[in-house]
Image (cartoon, grey):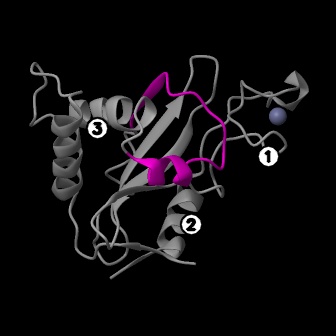
Amino acid sequence: MPRYAKKGCTRADIIEKMLDQLKADGGYDEDMDETDSEQVIQQWLYNCVAYSDMNPQIEKDLSKLEFDWENSEEDFESQKYGKLPDGTSIIWCFAGGDWEFPIHFAVYIDDKDHLRAYMPLDGNVYCPKCKCAYGSCEDEEHEPEEEPTPDWEKMYAAACKRIETR
Ligand SMILES: [Zn+2]
């Protein structure tokens, strides 16, 4: 089944929705600079996704792999891969514990106006045997010898293929 993003939705639209949730949830930090998208995204990931039941659909979206939320924020590659082919925006984030190599996923607004996440397996860094972030494997033998890095071209291609807009 394809996923649908709301056609034409911008990065600012996604961040505004995150702010709305932060204000509704009570996780809103008065000292936060609302114009600083990095802060808004990080606060939202912590207060509205990782340690909240506000977004059960996103929990489902991200349930393919096990990982910890200790370090979660927007990825600096986000801007480069932040638009689907028709210009609709997505925001790339990562999450992982200090002992893990982070998992990547894209946040977007769906056609029903809800925040959603898409976690591509293609190009992502994770253990295919344990379905978890490297660092949390059942067997240390699984861990790669060299530091793994995500394949952005593959992750982006997967997102473009899977997320349609309407
Ligand atoms: Zn493993």
Q: Badge 3 is on which residue? A: 41
Query: Which kind of residue does numbered mark 1 sit on?
Result: Pro
Q: Tell me if I can see residue 161 in this picture.
A: yes
| Residue type of the residue flagged with mark 3 | Ile
Residue on which the image places disc 2: 158
Q: CA distance from mark 2 to mark 3?
A: 23 Å
Query: Looking at the figure, which quarter contains the N terminus?
Result: bottom right
> Which residue occupies 29% across, 70% down?
88
Amino acid type assigned to the residue bearing label 2 in the image: Ala
Tag 2 near tag 3, CB within 8 Å: no
- Between disc 2 and disc 3, the foreground one is 3
Q: Residues within 10 Å of mark 3 (few under 14, many from 20)?
A: many
Residue stretch in magenta: 55-74
For numbered disc 3, what is the local secondary structure? helix
Alpha-carbon span between mark 2 and mark 1: 17 Å
Q: Position of residue 29 (x, y in %)?
A: 16, 22
Disc 1, SS:
loop
Q: Which residue is found at the position 57% from the left and 17% from the top? A: 98
Q: Position of residue 83 (x, y in %)?
A: 33, 64
> Looking at the picture, does residue 153 appear above or below residue 164?
above
Q: Cβ(mark 1) to ligand 1 < 8 Å? A: yes
Q: Quadrant of ligand 1?
A: top right
- Snapshot quadrant of residue 43: top left
Mark 1 or mark 3: whose residue is earlier in sequence: 3
Q: Which mark is residue 114?
A: none
Residue 66, compared with residue 33, is above or below; it is below
- Compare marks 2 and 3 and give the one earlier in the sequence: 3
Say if 164 sits above or below 135 in the image.
below
Please tell me which residue lies in front, 113 or 149: 113
User: According to the image, label 1 marks what residue?
Assistant: 128
Q: Residues within 10 Å of mark 2 (few under 14, many from 20)?
A: some
